[in-house]
């Protein structure tokens, strides 16, 4: 089977009827940004199915506008923590946190690709996207940057970005638990127990206050401003604005959000390392980390070329860009999930921005490296930057989607 056919088969196999799981076993539910990438992959051969993916995701939207990071449509014991641990309060059993808000950007891409029915689908999703983005603005803004209350919210679960805030947390009152992820993937490629204890502690805090954002803001020790959320939301607001204009909707509110987030992006610039960085609002400290999310500034349309030198430096250190953590850092672990490996969908977002900024040589290099890793090693969840070898889950939806829609 050729690679395109393999990628389409992965989407088909991970399709659970209206939504797609990232990969069976390891992630057997609907994840938020995974689903958006799935929709992008489906759009290559089945536009109605692409829209359906997004429409199913928004069925889980909470009354306060939040769109959860996991929707537990059908309980599956192969994953922990499940719906009972989360105690989500939305219309579909769910987690209590969100995920990078890339949906508006991809709704715009689908709208442009679907001359026939795109308008109807995008118009129906538009007010839901507005409600979600408003939730971020109301509850998750610190000096314009977007903050998270759990590392899982950024998708970059065990990035060294969280080492500082995690060191200040003593997890208390969590029951014994049985991790299921390490039944599917070797320990060395997954977060440590130290991280899991803190993940579960933060879930407990949220559940105990019924995911009331006002209460959570008061009590949580973890409130970190993050480039993933800030840059993806800023980009998504720019795309939402284009759709608002096309639909004859007012743009004033979106303009307020864009202005706030442009200023917020600047607060994430850490002059000591000359990079966009996470900022721990509780400790009042930068993380001191250059991650692949630091390079989403072009995607967000901010910062000019101030990240270019780091991008070129890192390309000299590893054959496959863009590693999720700087290989020059002592905390770099090239096989351990978000502490080093390369992620195809992050590369695509980075390159969308690079192409738009005219950095065709850089973008083409990263795209070719992404295609090569996939062609040689299959549709893995992530890849080792030293040799492109596969790591984490296999037959992975977003890697297949990125192949179909972009890398091939
Ligand atoms: C996990 O369980 O590893 C997920 O990344 C949480 O979203």
Image: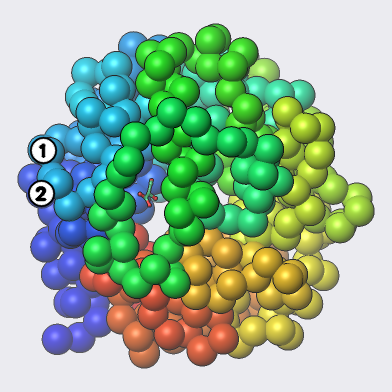
Check disc 2: other Cα within 10 Å, few if <14, some if 14-19, many if 20+: some
Q: Which residue bears the numbered disc 2?
A: 16
Please state which of residues 327 and 197 is positioned toward the viewer in this rendering.
Answer: 197
Q: Residue at image x 52%, y 35%?
A: 171
Q: Residue at image x 44%, y 22%?
A: 206
Q: Which residue bears the numbered disc 1?
A: 74
Vertically, is 342 above or below 19?
below
Callout 1: helix, strand or loop? loop
Q: Residue at image x 69%, y 55%?
A: 294
Does residue 204 appear to the left or right of 59 in the view shown?
right
Residue 170 drawn at (x, y percent): 59, 36
Instruction: Choose top left, top right, bottom left or bottom right for residue 14.
Output: bottom left
Callout 2: helix, strand or loop? loop
Residue 44 drawn at (x, y percent): 26, 61
Instruction: Choose top left, top right, bottom left or bottom right for residue 55.
Output: top left
Look at the numbered disc 2 and say if its residue's Cβ is closer than 8 Å to ligand 1. no
Does residue 363 appear to the left or right of 343 in the view shown?
right
Residue 21 drawn at (x, y percent): 21, 52
Residue 164 drawn at (x, y percent): 70, 46
Vertically, is 384 above or below 356?
below
Residue 300 can be seen in this image? no
């Amino acid at each position: 089977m050729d690679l395109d056919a393999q990628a389409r088969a992965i989407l088909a196999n991970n399709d659970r009827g209206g939504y797609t799981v990232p990969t069976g076993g390891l992630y057997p539910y609907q994840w938020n940004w995974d689903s958006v990438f799935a929709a992008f992959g489906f759009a290559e051969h089945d536009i109605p199915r692409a829209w359906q993916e997004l429409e199913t995701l928004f069925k889980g939207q909470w009354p306060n506008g939040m769109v959860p990071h996991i929707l537990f449509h059908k309980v599956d014991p192969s994953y922990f923590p499940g719906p009972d641990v989360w105690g989500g309060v939305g219309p579909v059993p769910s987690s209590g946190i969100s995920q990078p808000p890339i949906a508006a950007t991809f709704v715009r891409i689908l709208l442009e690709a679907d001359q026939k029915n795109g308008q109807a689908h995008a118009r129906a999703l538009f007010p839901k996207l507005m409600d979600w983005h408003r939730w971020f603005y109301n509850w998750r803004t610190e000096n314009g940057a977007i903050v998270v209350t759990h590392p899982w919210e950024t998708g970059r679960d065990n990035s060294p970005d969280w080492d500082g805030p995690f060191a200040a947390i003593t997890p208390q009152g969590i029951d014994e638990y049985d991790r299921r992820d390490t039944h599917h993937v070797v320990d060395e490629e997954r977060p440590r127990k130290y991280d899991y204890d803190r993940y579960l502690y933060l879930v407990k805090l949220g559940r105990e206050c019924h995911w009331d954002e006002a209460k959570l803001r008061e009590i949580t020790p973890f409130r970190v401003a993050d480039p993933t959320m800030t840059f993806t939301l800023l980009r998504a607001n720019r795309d939402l604005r284009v759709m608002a204009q096309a639909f004859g909707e007012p743009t004033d509110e979106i303009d307020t959000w864009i202005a706030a987030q442009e200023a917020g992006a600047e607060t994430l610039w850490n002059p000591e390392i000359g990079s966009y960085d996470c900022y721990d609002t509780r400790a009042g400290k930068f993380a001191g980390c250059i991650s692949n999310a630091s390079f989403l500034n072009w995607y967000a349309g901010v910062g000019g070329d101030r990240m270019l030198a780091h991008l070129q430096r890192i390309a000299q250190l590893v054959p496959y860009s863009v590693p999720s953590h700087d290989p020059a850092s002592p905390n770099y672990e090239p096989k351990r999930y978000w502490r080093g490996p390369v992620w195809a969908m992050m590369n695509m977002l980075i390159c969308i921005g690079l192409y738009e900024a005219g950095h065709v040589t850089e973008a083409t290099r990263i795209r070719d490296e992404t295609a090569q890793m996939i062609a040689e090693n299959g549709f893995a969840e992530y890849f080792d930057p030293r040799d492109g070898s596969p790591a984490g889950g296999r037959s992975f939806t977003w890697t297949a989607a990125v192949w179909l829609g972009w890398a091939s």
